[in-house]
Image (cartoon, rainbow, N blue to C red):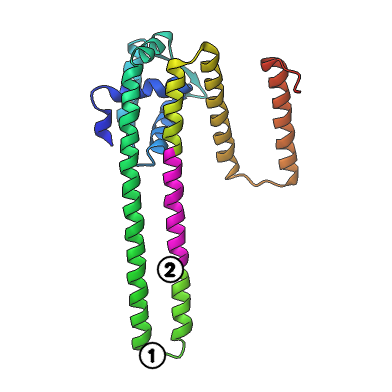
Amino acid sequence: MSPVFGHGRLRLYLLKLLEESPRHGYEVIRLLQDRFLGVYSPSPGTIYPRLARLEADGLVTHEVVKGKKVYSLTDKGREELERRMDELAELEEELSASAQEFARGVQEDVRQTVRSLREELTQAARTMRDQGKATSKDAWKETTERQKDEWKRQKEYWREQKRAWKEEWRRNWEDAWKTATGTREDVARLKLERLLRTFVEDVRAAATTARLDDDDLAAAQTLMEETRERLRAEVFRTDGS
């Protein structure tokens, strides 16, 4: 995966990520890991010096939030991103091809998993037959069910990974295209959609480790409804109808 980011292209992709939303260095690393499903995992020694160089070139700036440097795109950075939009589109196409190659690898992993499970089942059958125990039938059934469950779990996991990968790249491509061709209002709506996605992802991540009861859920619902109404009244200036 790393050759895709040769010749200054990682620099370009960092500009794209910061155009989507201000981020600190660790968020950039984590986002790259997530988007490439761990296949490409840059080190801090790769990302932080490039962020510092972008800042030295006047393309990004930072502010310290809770002890962390949060980087955001400057007007000069947006101008470079817009100027290199054709190159960004080409990069997205190459990354999409890499995603397809990865998906083919996933399919091969699934096939290999199936082959391994079949071999294990065959070996288990031989073992049961050789032992000739009265409990061999029950043991065989238990082994079969266990292997089937594992096969289903592996198959579902890789199917979900492929779906997430394809959806992420579809979204990235559409976002890049809208940014390049849309009106100012279209770009503003696109940025709002990105903010909403990030908000939902952050809340979902926090909820995975939280112990929620009915009162917590009611409080969360109330907060979300209040936020929705404030956005309608103070930002969107609609009556909610």
Residue neighbourhood size for the residue with mark 1, other residues' Cα within 10 Å, grouped as few (<14), some (14–19), many (≥20): few
Question: x, y percentage for residue 166?
Answer: 42, 39
Q: What amino acid is labelled 2 in the image?
A: Gln
When the figure is inspected, residue 161 is found, relative to residue 13, above or below; the finding is below
Horizontal side of residue 4 vs 191, given as left or right: left
Residue furthest front in the image = 181
Q: Could you tell me which secondary element the residue under label 1 belongs to?
A: loop
Q: Quadrant of the C terminus?
A: top right
Is 14 in front, or is 100? 100
When the figure is inspected, residue 161 is found, relative to residue 229, above or below; the finding is below
Q: Could you tell me which secondary element the residue under label 2 belongs to?
A: helix
Q: Is residue 100 visible?
A: yes
Question: x, y percentage for residue 128?
Answer: 38, 84
Query: In the image, what residue occupies the spot 41% across and 34% down?
Result: 169
Question: x, y percentage for residue 227?
Answer: 70, 26
Query: In the image, what residue occupies the spot 48% across and 15% down?
Result: 182
When the figure is inspected, residue 153 is found, relative to residue 77, above or below; the finding is below
Is 206 in front, or is 239? 239
Q: Main secondary structure of the magenta part?
A: helix
Q: Quadrant of the N terminus?
A: top left
Query: In the image, what residue occupies the spot 59% across and 36% down?
Result: 203
Question: Label 2 belongs to which residue?
Answer: 147
Question: Label 1 belongs to which residue?
Answer: 132
In magenta segment, residue 149? yes
Residue neighbourhood size for the residue with mark 2, other residues' Cα within 10 Å, grouped as few (<14), some (14–19), many (≥20): some
Q: Which residues are magenta?
A: 148-166
